[in-house]
């Protein structure tokens, strides 16, 4: 059975995940959702995003990084030179992985994904690191949760889970 890919991201209404480096908004409930959804799972991340996310990874995560090995590497961090090698190697050991960024990794994996978990942040960034277009014909909304702006969240957002509606493989 092929490795199942789920992409998780926070995306502005105009399609960006970042204005350059880092996360451009502070949404505590979305961070809690991300942590709960990825708890104890295998994560796939690009090298630059891995470097930026120091402190986000928990001991229960197994982190698969596309990029050159860093030193020192944590015990549950594995490095791969490219996506093909990861899919071939990790696919023999695990059945699912959650893709957490960055932009080029999302672009490389969206066509093979079976699920998207997208936090639609209701703001415009205008430019930055894009998330691939989500073609409505390829995806079916299976769950959505809306969060208004409040004292802890300057921006409203919606967490939407999509399952693929096209045959992959």
Image (cartoon, rainbow, N blue to C red):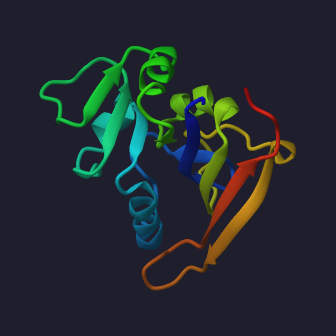
| Residue 165, image quadrant | top right
* Count of marks overlaid on the render: 0
Q: Quadrant of the N terminus?
A: top right
Residue 33 percent across, percent down from the top left: 46, 66
Left or right? Give the position of 24 relative to 50.
right
- Is residue 21 shown to the viewer in this render? no
Where residue 76 sits, quadrant-wise, is top left
At 31% from the left edge and 40% from the top edge, which residue is drawn? 62
Determine if residue 43 is in view. Answer: yes
Asked if residue 96 lies left or right of residue 143, the reply is left
The spot of residue 65 in percent (x, y) is 36, 29
Q: Give me the residue at 17% from left, 36% from top.
A: 74
> Hey, which residue is sitting farthest bottom in the picture?
151
Residue at the spot 51% in from the left edge and 84% down from the top edge? 150
Q: Residue at the spot x=64%, y=73% of the render?
A: 145
Q: Is residue 38 above or below residue 16?
A: below
Residue with the most extreme left position: 72
The quadrant in which the C terminus is found is: top right
In this picture, residue 160 sits left or right of residue 8? right
Return the x and y of residue 60 as percentages of the image width and height. 27, 51
36, 136: nearer the viewer: 36
Residue 15 percent location from the top left of the image: 66, 47
């Amino acid at each position: 059975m092929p490795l199942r890919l789920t992409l998780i991201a926070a995306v502005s209404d105009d399609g960006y995940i970042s204005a350059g480096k880092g996360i451009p908004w502070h949404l505590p409930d979305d961070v809690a959702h991300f942590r709960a959804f990825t708890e104890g799972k295998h994560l796939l991340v690009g090298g630059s995003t891995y470097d930026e996310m120091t402190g986000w990874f928990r001991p229960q995560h197994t982190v698969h990084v596309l990029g050159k090995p860093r030193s020192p590497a944590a015990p549950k961090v594995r490095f791969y030179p490219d996506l093909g090698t990861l899919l071939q190697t990790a696919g023999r050991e695990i059945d699912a992985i959650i893709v957490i960024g960055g932009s080029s990794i999302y672009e490389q994996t969206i066509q093979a994904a079976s699920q998207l978990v997208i936090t639609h942040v209701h703001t415009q960034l205008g430019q930055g690191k894009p998330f691939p277009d989500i073609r409505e014909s390829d995806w079916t909304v299976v769950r959505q949760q809306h969060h208004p702006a409040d004292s802890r969240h300057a921006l409203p957002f919606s967490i939407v889970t999509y399952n693929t509606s096209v045959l992959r493989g």
